[in-house]
Image (cartoon, rainbow, N blue to C red):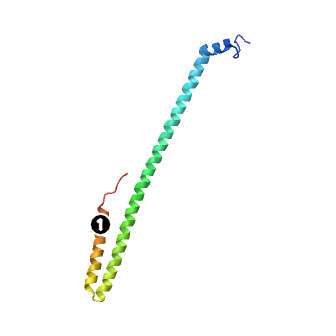
Amino acid sequence: MNGIPSASSAQGVQYLLTDPVVTGLVGWVGLFVTVVGLWIAIDQILRVKSAANAAGDAVNALTVAIYSRERLLEMTSSIGNVEIAKNYITQRMFPLATLCVDIALKECTQVHALLEKPEQKW
């Protein structure tokens, strides 16, 4: 058996546990596996961080889009009230026209407040 006891015997196991070449090889393999595992863990952490940043950016973009649609809806409503006021003016129904213009002005004021509202960062 080439001077090396067989691994099945108790002497063979003791030899493998105390042989400096075998223990050194096991140590280097262990170090390699640890470094590779650490590298994989760091890579996964960076990917998760990148995904979280992308999700945050998507939330911010959606918030801006919602505010934009809200402004557009308010302006559309305001334009409708101005058109109604114009019809009342042609019919010489000035109190109703004044009411519609006041409502349109209120809606324009709300849009102005939305435009001045600072964008929120999540």
82 relative to 39 in the view: left or right: left
Furthest residue in direction top, as rendered: 3
Furthest residue in direction right, as rendered: 1
111 relative to 31 in the view: left or right: left
Q: Nearer the viewer, residue 92 or 47?
A: 92
- Label 1 crowding class (10 Å Cα cut-off): few <14, some 14-19, many 20+? few
Against 6, residue 108 (above or below) is: below
110 relative to 10 in the view: left or right: left
Q: In which quarter of the view is residue 113 placed? A: bottom left
Q: Position of residue 117 (x, y in %)?
A: 30, 60
What residue is shown at x 30% (from left), y 82% (from top)? 85
* Mark 1 lies on residue: 112
Tell me the quadrant of the picture where the N terminus can be found: top right
Count of numbered tags = 1
Against 78, residue 7 (above or below) is: above
Q: Position of residue 57 (x, y in %)?
A: 42, 52
Q: Which structural element holds mark 1?
A: helix
Q: Position of residue 26 (x, y in %)?
A: 59, 21
What residue is shown at x 64% (from left), y 16% (from top)? 16
What residue is shown at x 56% (from left), y 27% (from top)? 32
